[in-house]
Amino acid sequence: MDPLSPPESGAAASPVDRVEFETLISDTSAHLIQAQPDELKAVIETALGRFRTFFRAGRCALLTVSADRQVVKVFAASYAPGIPQVSAEVNLAALFPWSTRKLVVEVSATGTRRLADLPPEAAVDRASWEALSTKSSLMVPLVTASAVSHLIVMASVTEEREWPVEYVPRLRVLGEMMVAAVHRQQAFDAVRASEAHLREQTTRLAAAVEAAELGFSEWVVGDGPLFLDARLRDLLGIGPEDEPQAYDVWLSRTAATDRDQLRELCRQLEVGEIERAAAEYRYDHPLRGRIWFRHTARRAHTDLATGPGAKVISAVQDITDRRGREEALQQAHEEVKRLRDRLERENVYLRKEVAHGAGSDLVIGRSPAIVHALELATQVGNTDATVLLLGETGTGKERFASFIHQASARRGHHMVRVNCSAIPTALIESELFGREKGAFTGALSRQIGRFELAHGSTLFLDEIGDLPIDVQVKLLRVLQERTIERLGNPRPIDVDVRIIAATNGNLEAAVRAGTFRSDLYYRLNVFPIVVPALRERREDIPVLVETLVEELGALMRKRFDSVERASIEALMRYDWPGNVRELRNVLERAMILASGPTLSVAPPHAASTAPAAARASTVSRDMRDVEREHILRVLEAANWKVRGVNGAAAVLGLKPTTLEARIARLGIRRPDRRA
């Protein structure tokens, strides 16, 4: 028999029952309408209790169904005394899958007279009912917006029974009234939450405006008037007498360089070219002087008394302190960048110095000539006087410069070295004085020059005679004014640099020839020191050989117990046109070829071992002829190869460019090979 029985089946309600049922529905409806939001759930539970009593059921509940129809939970319920309650956290869809499908998917009221009548596919439901001590049940789906959102469930726990079908529609009405009341409560809660959120947001906004010290203005597009709040009037310094012309006063006090920007921003907002804009500009306050504003504006469409229109709403903030901090930070960044650039250049320079073995500042020798030169260097070292080192190539002028620097108060900084003949003419100016990015084609980044790098230290200018005339003029200005200008930037930069210059040429002759400025020569020739040639201090050759062999041996990982006495004597008889540099190269070649513990060294040319009379005649000859003859012999031995490992420049210990310049100066020509 169908558990939802029609009246003629014997389970029809009596007239008294029907009247009582209708009275319950009427009372429940009135209570639901009158219930306050925070009382609603208690009213629903009371109503469920009255209907449970009417049906003599053990449980009566209103269940909620999730939107995806996967979760069914108890919203409110009434239980007879002693009946176990069902937790609101339990998902009933998992306990009653067959019933859930019938109710939620098929939207069909389901009545179970006895558990034995359930179909086999409802085995899970049967087990769940048994666990809840249920004999029979009645479940009615409630539809909201074309989907089942709630269920009314009635359960008998003491007896099996039939459920009169005529009550089902009225139970559905009852459930729909409850659901409507629940929705009202949810809407009320949402409104209350929204109001609380709005109050919180309003409070936060007011606090933010207060903290940001914003001033607001508003004007109607087309005809005004301009409205300024009290804070903005204070920011602008506009009194009551200025309010009628507030906009004109505002513009007139804006800095002249920024006024057009503000005027254009307002125009674009008025005509609707843009909807929002922001700008930062300077403003001359009548009491505070020059200050900075950040101005943010937005065009808003609104309803006016005359019809639809638009307003422009602006917020103005005083950012003077922030701009001041930004400018200070920018200056700090520029200073940090300048120092970083200098450190990077110093690091690069020091790596080059280490690679070229320029770390040692020791001047070796005990001869009267070298002792006299060192005495002069010691005397001038303690001063900031400009020093001019004179001497042949390879005599050690750079080591003398280091000696003078170490004897000065500037020794805490690294001495900076520049070989004027080794830098292309087109780049020498930027190397010395620096350049800005884009100062000339190929200048892809900013570069500080050697003068800036040597600030507070010593700058050694080797081969000063090869400096171009136009750079000589700028060098003279630096020596006189102690300032430089980077290429591409006319702003002068103060430098504190001590100059030590060196040359192996005759600067006086260069002045007479017009290739060297006389005023620069006199400015450099404050304290000249002649570094003696090696042939003028032959007694220093043994100690030089000993020191150089030890130094080179450490680099080559070779050790020699001694140097042949005959070799030392032969080296002392040689005239050394390449001086100490040539001696070093001769020793290095001999050490590479040597295999025993005793080093044997031969002078570069057989003429070195000629009789004393022949050597005397060689010494008495003009030094230019001696130099020409020696270079010619080395070129012939190197098959006229200048550059490379076995070239004449490497043998003489000269840079290829220096040797080529001397070949041209001495008029050396390669003979015609065909002849």
Image: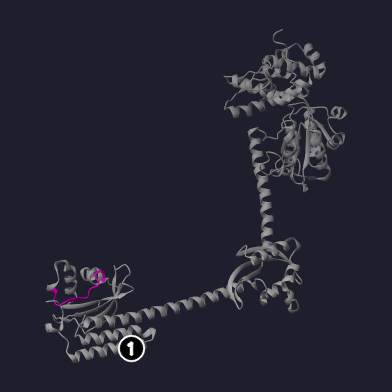
| Residue under the image location 70 percent in, 8 percent down | 674
Q: Is residue 208 above or below residue 444?
A: below
The answer to whether 80 is drawn above or below residue 292 in the figure is below
Nearer-the-camera pick, 403 or 30: 30
Q: Position of residue 653 (x, y in %)?
A: 69, 24
Residue at 34% from the left image edge and 86% from the top image edge: 32
Colouring method of the image: one colour
The residue nearer to you, when weighing 243 against 674, is: 243
- SS at badge 1: helix
Q: In the rendered image, which quarter is residue 207 located in?
A: bottom right
In the image, which residues are magenta? 104-115
> Total of numbered circles in the picture?
1
Look at label 1 and name its amino acid: His
Q: Which quarter of the rendered picture does the C terminus lie within?
A: top right
- Residue 418 lies, in percent from the top left, at 73, 35
Give the left or right position of residue 250, taking residue 46 as reference: right
Question: Residue at the location (63% across, 67% down)?
Answer: 297
Image quadrant in which you'd find residue 88: bottom left
Q: Quadrant of the N terminus?
A: bottom left
Within 10 Å of the Cα at label 1, are there few (<14), some (14-19), or many (20+) other Cα atoms?
Answer: some
Residue on which the image places disc 1: 31
Q: Percent position (x, y) of residue 476?
A: 83, 39
Please check the rendered image and state whether residue 108 is part of the magenta-colored stretch, yes or no. yes
Q: Does any portion of residue 142 appear in the rendered image?
A: yes
- Rendered position, 614 above or below 512: above
The picture quadrant where one finds residue 517 is top right
Left-right relation of 128 to 660: left
Q: Residue at the location (81% across, 13% down)?
A: 617
Residue 646 percent across, percent down from the top left: 64, 20
